[in-house]
Image (spheres, rainbow, N blue to C red):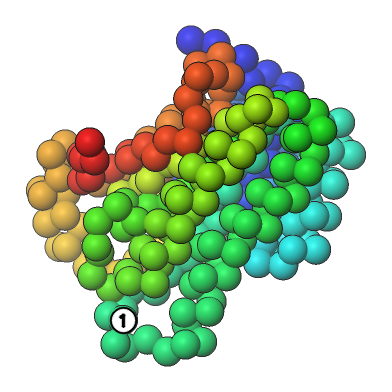
Amino acid sequence: MDLDLKNKSVLITGGGSNIGRAIVLAFASEGANITIGDIDTNQAQKTADLALKLGAGSAIVQRTDVTQYDQTKALVKTAIEKHERLDILVNNVGWDQMMFFTQTEPSFWQKVIQINYLSVLNCTHAALEFMIKNNSGAIVSISSDASRQGEPREAVYGGCKAAVNSFTKTIAKENGRYGIRCNVVCPGITIPTSNEEIGSTSLWADPGSMFSSEQFDKIAKTLPLRKVGRAQDIANAVVFLASNKAAGHITGQILSVSGGYSMIG
Ligand SMILES: NC(=O)c1ccc[n+]([C@@H]2O[C@H](COP(=O)([O-])OP(=O)(O)OC[C@H]3O[C@@H](n4cnc5c(N)ncnc54)[C@H](O)[C@@H]3O)[C@@H](O)[C@H]2O)c1
């Protein structure tokens, strides 16, 4: 199906690595014009170069720390100046270190809240200003199945992602009248296929800090579909939700892409 994303201006945060990278490349294959905001410009530039080869009309990178409001405003401004408009925002940046809550300190909570929740507020606020004036837009935020059911060693992260879900529903209700749709994709465990796909700032730079390879196998066996996720699985859902042609009557929804890990009625 043609998703009608050709020449759309798409801004993707954290587009250098793993899921964000696959999202960039999925939009590129649809002929979109892409802006990537990432702290790892080296990895993001590699992704942008590949995006051009795959068919992106344009692919630019701007170093952006999405926890900083001024930097996200500047990122949105760049996307609009370069591509004349902003049609789609993908809030993809996220981060965690798996620890039991009792092992963590307030400084860690602050970091997790800033990267996983404040970043979404910053980028969404900056993008809405333009989208409302333009009476159209789509926002897709990447949450996690950890937001939908308690996940040991992800207490603060899961809470932030649940906040992203709730925030999205409110934003969808407030801005539907302007033709703006807002949805969430919740990945389950989604692992890179090679080191090419991740940067040094990726939470997958040291996968052993999260799970051993035996644990990955065990996790796969517990899932209804008997396999862990790949970044392309998430990207497919994101381009679908971003497309007005495919998902034009869908807003305020939380979609798990996790091999059946979460099944919320
Ligand atoms: N991979 C999984 O198993 C999984 C599961 C559930 C949810 N998620 C969510 O999916 C999203 C992507 O995960 P991933 O596995 O691709 O992560 P990743 O760590 O591989 O990539 C994250 C990207 O964001 C960038 N980044 C980090 N902090 C930033 C900041 N402050 N400003 C700008 N850029 C920053 C990094 O440089 C990197 O390019 C995240 O929101 C994550 O919480 C991932």
Q: Is mark 1 within 8 Å of ligand 1?
A: no
Q: Position of residue 172 (x, y in %)?
A: 55, 37
Find residue 26 and report its image quarter.
Answer: top right
Relative to 219, residue 238 above or below: above
**Label 1 sits on what residue type?**
Phe
Query: Left of 22 or right of it: where is 124?
Result: right
Query: Left of 159 or right of it: where is 228?
Result: left
**Near-viewer residue (251 or 119):** 251
Does residue 258 appear anywhere in the picture? Answer: yes
How dense is the environment of label 1, judged by Cα within 10 Å: few (below 14), some, or many (20 and up)?
few
Find residue 7 and report its image quarter.
Answer: top right
How many marks are shown on the rendered structure? 1
Rendered residue at 51%/87% (across/down): 107
**Near-viewer residue (256 or 239):** 256
Rendered residue at 58%/43% (across/down): 171
Q: Name the residue under label 1.
A: 101
Q: Where is residue 47 in the image (x, y as percent from the top left)?
A: 62, 45
Rendered residue at 50%/30% (across/down): 251
**Near-viewer residue (262 or 43):** 262
Relative to 142, residue 250 above or below: above
Q: What is the quadrant of the C terminus in the image?
A: top left
Query: Left of 164 or right of it: where is 66?
Result: right
Q: Where is residue 244 in the image (x, y as percent from the top left)?
A: 58, 19
Q: Is mark 1 on a helix, strand or loop?
A: helix
Rendered residue at 60%/64% (across/down): 118
- Residue closest to the far right: 81
Query: Left of 88 or right of it: where is 62?
Result: right
